[in-house]
């Protein structure tokens, strides 16, 4: 290694210098070209300086940035998301080495496109004996129904990922081809964002190639195959419980795509539509993130509950661009790797520039004999990503690890069904530095590199990759395994890289001031997010009132007063506590932190987080930061500690309200969120006024009612006497200027509903608009001395009916394809 740094004024020192010293005598940089040594040295020097000589400090800085960006993932079986494990040390590849990788992947993408096209159209490869039929039909990802269904412009692939491994000798191999779901591309982008924030100008100073042009090409490539000049493209997700849902939401937001699930979509007359609050709107293209088998229960797997009935029909009629085309995943079978070298010669007239790992399909006698004869030197795996006898749950096993019994079992199974197995060379991966246990250490890595079509139909390679630093030996893991880390991979140029983003080229654009379409499910989630946030806040206010009364006996009712009993009973009715008669400390502690109580603050915040998961593409990272904060600690006693815990939670809810008030654009999405809060506040206002503002209410009851509505100051400014029933009722229920009153909520709800789109073309009001307007008009002329308990009960019933009407009109979109009465034409 040379000593000349890339970044001026830096010397190898500290933990970076120690690592470089050890690298000269071991395999810490195994496989890395020698000319990259100065770049590695300079980068490690700068990182050492930023971490103040402590690797743990550097790791902590990057971890905080990843958390701020909301990076998370799930392993199979996880109920909760895990923090994203991002290494603070990127992996570096020089421009010359990267050019060879680019050329190899562009060639390989074109080869896969031609093979898939032949499988579903001419089928000449099988007919001419270049590809065994069993290799095609044996794959669970081959769908005969797609034969003859040609994609727009003949493009079966728009997006492709290759898992690459570099051996200690520096030679790259393709470990796996992935075309079904492009998992990892969003994480690669997020890794770059997190690392850039944590390391300042480091990546720019190293002349790191930028990722934004690739995503601009990807977006143009998807759009050009759609049938409209300004197409509407959806990112089809399996839902928020998918392992990479956070990645999908981030990509949809970054690329300006509509994040949709199967329930959001419907096919009519061979066209795909999304259910929105404005009715059915046409979708021109889908970037799918689910396997073909789940796409359409009528054409593929009838047990699928996340697909779109008749989606195949939309594809077959040519009215829909789908990336990648259903059935393209047939190429992922390990068995195909055995034939790609000869297929390259047949279809492209040349050898593969980037070879895959040596593979022998056991469906051929000579290849089977080779695998069984060299079992100790090979990895034996399932040929078609299915369970196979003798391989265990990993569907692969290294022959040298088998004992005599396991070896006999495997050989017997291979003799019975040899076509189910392949043998592959055992790959020794090169390493890259990572921080493990507070110090630098080498970890083996694989790269997932991404390829996409641009607006001209040409292949483009993302100048970066998703790097997985393996904690185990499964090099073919789909993305991340237990204990694995991810890392950014940077392509380093010799010259400064000009800035680039997803911004346009400066040409003429039609300026818009619309918020975009709002899917019905997103409107539903936003509405209920508002309701549950408001429900949480009012539960906290009641808890705080109970605690405050029990602490400050001289300023309020005693702990055994009727007012206290009514508040405790209300918490029990809301499901916040299971025993209203228990001591105040235990009652409030349970209402705050007992997740087993469905109405407790802990449970309600869990619901808020769950609903928010379905809105990941629409909510800012500040929202997640507030929701994910742990509940304040308290000792469960009736002390200021418990009171402080409730107060701090109210402050957190207020911060969430502030985000919505100040940061959300006044689009339909904001209206549904605000409507949810106001309907919940109005319903709760009715119930609390019935509870504490009845005809027999005491002064203590009225005092607490004013406190719960934040109206004590307003009342004292207006009235010199203590609380009296008519003016208290007027202030908390009917005052049009009080943002906590029922009448105020009714007026805002009516304004929101009136501003929402209508399906009717005859100018007549829809049911939510009619109910909201009538409610506001009913409350407007009333005063406190006119408001009766019967009227309050009626108002609550009308609010509940209004909520149901909103749900039926905007959330439960018409499932049938025929036009509803008065509705405008589909668009």
Image (cartoon, rainbow, N blue to C red):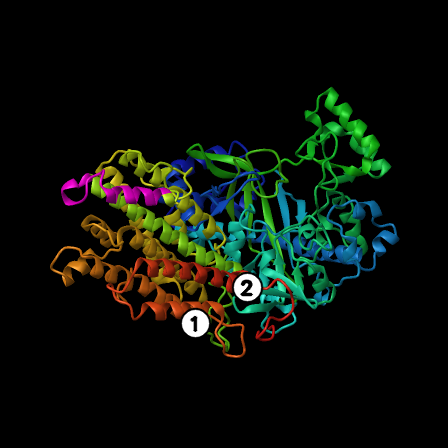
Magenta stretch: includes residue 244 = no
Position of residue 512 relative to residue 73, above or below, is below
Say which mark, if any, is on residue 216. 2
Magenta stretch: includes residue 560 = yes
Residue density around tag 1, few if under 14, some if 14–19, many if 20 or more, within 10 Å? few
Left or right of 652? Residue 454 is right
Q: Quadrant of the C terminus?
A: bottom right
Residue drawn at point x = 71 percent, y = 58 percent: 110
**Is residue 621 at least partly visible in the picture?**
no
Left or right of 332? Residue 533 is left
Majority SS type along the magenta span: helix
Image quarter of residue 232: bottom right
Label 2 secondary element: helix
Residue 303: percent from the left, percent from the top?
69, 48
Residue drawn at point x = 38 percent, y = 60 percent: 794
Position of residue 237 relative to residue 338, above or below, is below
Q: CA distance from mark 2 to mark 1?
A: 35 Å
Left or right of 760? Residue 43 is left
Residue drawn at point x = 75 percent, y = 55 percent: 116
Report the span colored magenta.
551-572
Q: Which residue is mark 1?
A: 755
Residue 443: percent from the left, percent from the top?
53, 36
Residue 10: percent from the left, percent from the top?
38, 46
Label 1 secondary element: helix
Image quarter of residue 619: bottom left
Q: State the residue in front, 408 or 524.
A: 524
> Mark 2 and 1 residues: CB-CB less than 8 Å, in contact?
no
Residue 758: percent from the left, percent from the top?
50, 72
Kindly report which numbered mark, 2 or 1, lies closer to the viewer in this rendering.
1
Residue drawn at point x = 28 percent, y = 68 percent: 782
Q: State the residue in front, 200 or 114.
A: 114
Q: Mark 2 or mark 1: name the one nearer the start of the chain.
A: 2
């Amino acid at each position: 290694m040379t000593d000349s740094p890339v970044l001026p004024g830096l010397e190898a020192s500290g933990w970076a210098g120690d690592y470089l010293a050890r690298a000269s005598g071991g395999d810490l940089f195994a496989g890395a070209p020698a000319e990259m040594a100065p770049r590695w040295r300079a980068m490690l020097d700068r990182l050492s300086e930023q971490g103040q000589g402590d690797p743990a400090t550097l790791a902590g800085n990057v971890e905080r940035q990843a958390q701020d960006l909301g990076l998370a993932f799930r392993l199979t079986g996880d109920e909760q998301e895990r923090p994203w494990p991002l290494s603070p040390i990127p992996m570096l590849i020089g421009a010359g080495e990267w050019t060879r990788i680019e050329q190899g992947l562009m060639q390989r993408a074109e080869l896969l496109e031609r093979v898939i096209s032949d499988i579903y159209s001419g089928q000449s490869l099988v007919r001419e004996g270049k590809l065994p039929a069993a290799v095609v039909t044996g794959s669970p990802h081959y769908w005969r129904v797609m034969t003859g269904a040609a994609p727009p412009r003949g493009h079966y692939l728009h997006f492709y990922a290759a898992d690459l491994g570099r051996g200690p000798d520096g030679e790259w191999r393709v470990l796996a081809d992935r075309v079904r779901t492009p998992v990892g591309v969003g994480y690669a982008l997020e890794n770059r964002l997190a690392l850039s924030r944590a390391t300042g100008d480091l990546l720019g100073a190293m002349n790191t190639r930028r990722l934004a042009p690739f995503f601009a090409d990807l977006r143009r490539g998807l759009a050009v195959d759609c049938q409209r000049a300004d197409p509407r493209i959806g990112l089809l997700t399996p839902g928020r419980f998918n392992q990479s849902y956070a990645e999908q939401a981030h990509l949809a937001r970054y690329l300006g795509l509509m994040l949709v699930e199967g329930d959001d979509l419907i096919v009519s007359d061979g066209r795909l539509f999304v259910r929105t609050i404005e009715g059915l709107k046409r979708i021109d293209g889908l970037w799918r993130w689910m396997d073909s088998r789940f796409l359409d229960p009528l054409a593929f797997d009838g047990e699928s509950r996340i697909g779109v009935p008749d989606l195949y029909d939309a594809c077959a009629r040519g009215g829909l661009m789908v990336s990648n085309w259903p059935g393209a995943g047939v190429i992922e079978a390990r068995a195909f790797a055995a034939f790609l070298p000869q297929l390259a010669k047949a279809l492209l007239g040349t050898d593969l520039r980037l070879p895959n790992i040596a593979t022998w399909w056991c469906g051929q006698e000579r290849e089977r004999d080779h695998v069984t004869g060299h079992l100790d030197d090979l990895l034996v795996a399932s040929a078609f990503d299915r369970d196979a006898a003798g391989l265990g749950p990993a569907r692969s096993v290294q022959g040298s690890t088998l004992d005599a019994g396991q070896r006999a079992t495997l050989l017997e199974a291979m003799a019975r069904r040899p076509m189910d197995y392949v043998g592959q060379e055992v790959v020794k991966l090169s390493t890259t530095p990572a921080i493990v246990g507070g110090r630098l250490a080498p970890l083996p890595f694989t790269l997932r590199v991404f390829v996409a079509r641009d607006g001209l139909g040409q292949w483009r390679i993302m100048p970066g990759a998703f790097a997985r630093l393996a904690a185990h030996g499964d090099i073919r893991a789909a993305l991340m395994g237990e204990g694995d880390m991810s890392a950014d991979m940077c392509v380093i140029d010799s010259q400064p890289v000009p800035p680039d983003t997803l911004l346009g080229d400066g040409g003429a654009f039609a300026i818009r001031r619309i918020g975009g379409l709002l899917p019905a499910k997103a409107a539903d989630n936003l509405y209920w997010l508002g309701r549950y946030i408001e429900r949480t806040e009012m539960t906290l206010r009641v808890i705080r009132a109970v605690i405050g009364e029990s602490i400050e006996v001289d300023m309020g009712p005693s702990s055994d007063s009727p007012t206290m009993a009514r508040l405790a009973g209300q918490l029990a009715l809301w499901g916040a506590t299971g025993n209203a008669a228990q001591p105040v400390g235990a009652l409030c502690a349970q209402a705050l932190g007992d997740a087993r109580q469905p109405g407790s603050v802990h449970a309600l915040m869990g619901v808020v987080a769950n609903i928010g998961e379905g809105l990941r593409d629409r909510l800012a990272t500040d929202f997640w930061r507030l929701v994910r904060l742990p509940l304040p600690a308290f000792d469960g006693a009736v002390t200021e500690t418990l009171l402080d815990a409730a107060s701090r939670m109210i402050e957190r809810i207020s911060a969430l309200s502030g985000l919505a008030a100040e940061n959300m654009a006044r689009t339909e999405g904001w209206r549904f969120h605000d409507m949810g809060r106001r309907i919940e506040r109005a319903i709760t206002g009715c119930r609390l006024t019935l509870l504490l503002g009845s005809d027999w209410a005491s002064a203590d009851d009225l005092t607490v009612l004013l406190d719960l509505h934040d109206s004590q100051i307003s009342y004292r400014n207006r009235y010199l006497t203590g609380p009296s029933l008519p003016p208290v009722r007027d202030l908390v229920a009917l005052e049009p200027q009080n943002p906590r009153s029922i009448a105020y909520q009714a007026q805002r709800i009516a304004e929101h509903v009136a501003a929402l789109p209508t399906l009717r073309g005859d100018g007549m009001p829809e049911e939510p608009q009619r109910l909201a307007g009538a409610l506001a008009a009913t409350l407007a002329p009333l005063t406190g001395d006119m408001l009766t308990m019967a009227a309050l009960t009626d108002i609550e019933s009308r609010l509940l009916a209004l909520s149901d009407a909103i749900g039926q009109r905007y959330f439960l979109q018409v499932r049938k394809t025929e036009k509803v009465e008065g509705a405008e034409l589909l668009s």
